[in-house]
Image: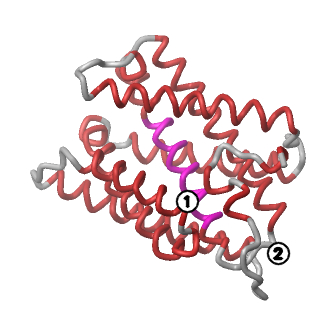
Amino acid sequence: MSFLKTNNPAFSPYFWEQKNVSQKKMTVSGIIIKTFLMLFITTGITVFVWKLYSNGVNIKWFATGGVLAAIVISIILSVRQNWAHILVPLYAIAKGFFLGGFTSYIKAQYPEMPYQAVGVTLVTFFTILMLYQTRIIVVTKKLRSVIITVCSTIFLVYLISWILSFFGIRSFIWGTSWLAISFNIVAATFAALSFLLDFDFIERYKNKAPKYKEWMACYGLLVTIIWLYVEVLRLMKKLAIKF
């Protein structure tokens, strides 16, 4: 059904099909606990990579390796959702290495910027949550369609740019032009708005879906939180260079 669609692969209807009957159901508290635990793991790995970099260790391939590992894990997770309790922690570790590699160079130039990006991400998360809970923003079919379309386009642009980079072609999105900055602003905005779809889907299935689906919900939130953080950090760096 169309009203169940979301840009986040972890919340696609496939993951919510009732294949097994379970007495224990997915709860919001269970999702929160698992999400905080996964974020703790990701943060710990990120800080570990920072320390390696500060000690002179070559971390050139950490970001790329983390991304590739995360992609492979996500693909496996899409067909083996019953392994989520193993794969989601592995995904958190992979993203930790990615964030560590990605942010080490930024932190070296702008020591406070990663922490500022974390702050902006947290404020945005709770702001969107408040807007959703108070129904100031209502997730309608039209809004859902717009968010999904734009987010899919953004991911496609990133994918094409990443592939082109292997051929030595540098896409406009990596620069500091106003076009690149505008793209980052749009990406960060829709990363934040995608929380609405995640919250809406969780609300629809809380106390209904099997207990192990908490791991899939956790995975979905983890994907969105990390995406928003990366977009905010990238935007802050571009603005710092520009001005």
Q: Main secondary structure of the magenta part?
A: helix
Query: The residue tagged with tag 2: helix, strand or loop?
Result: loop
- Left or right: 28 in relation to 174: right
In this view, the residue in front, 59 or 219, is 219
Residue 129, above or below 186: below
Residue 19, above or below 173: below
Residue at left 81%, top 66%? 205
In this view, the residue in front, 19 or 123, is 19
Q: Which residue is mark 2?
A: 207
Per the image, is 218 magenta? yes
Query: The residue tagged with tag 1: helix, strand or loop?
Result: helix
- Left or right: 85 in relation to 102: right
Q: How dense is the environment of label 2, judged by Cα within 10 Å: few (below 14), some, or many (20 and up)?
A: some
* Lower sequence index among marks 1 and 2: 1
- Looking at the rendering, which quadrant does residue 219 occupy? bottom right
Q: Which residue is mark 1?
A: 78
Residue 7 appearing in the image: yes
Q: How dense is the environment of label 1, judged by Cα within 10 Å: few (below 14), some, or many (20 and up)?
A: some
Residue at left 84%, top 49%? 1
In this view, the residue in front, 183 or 216, is 216
Looking at the picture, how far across and down is residue 183, in whole percent?
A: 53, 21
Checking the image for residue 127, the label placed there is: none
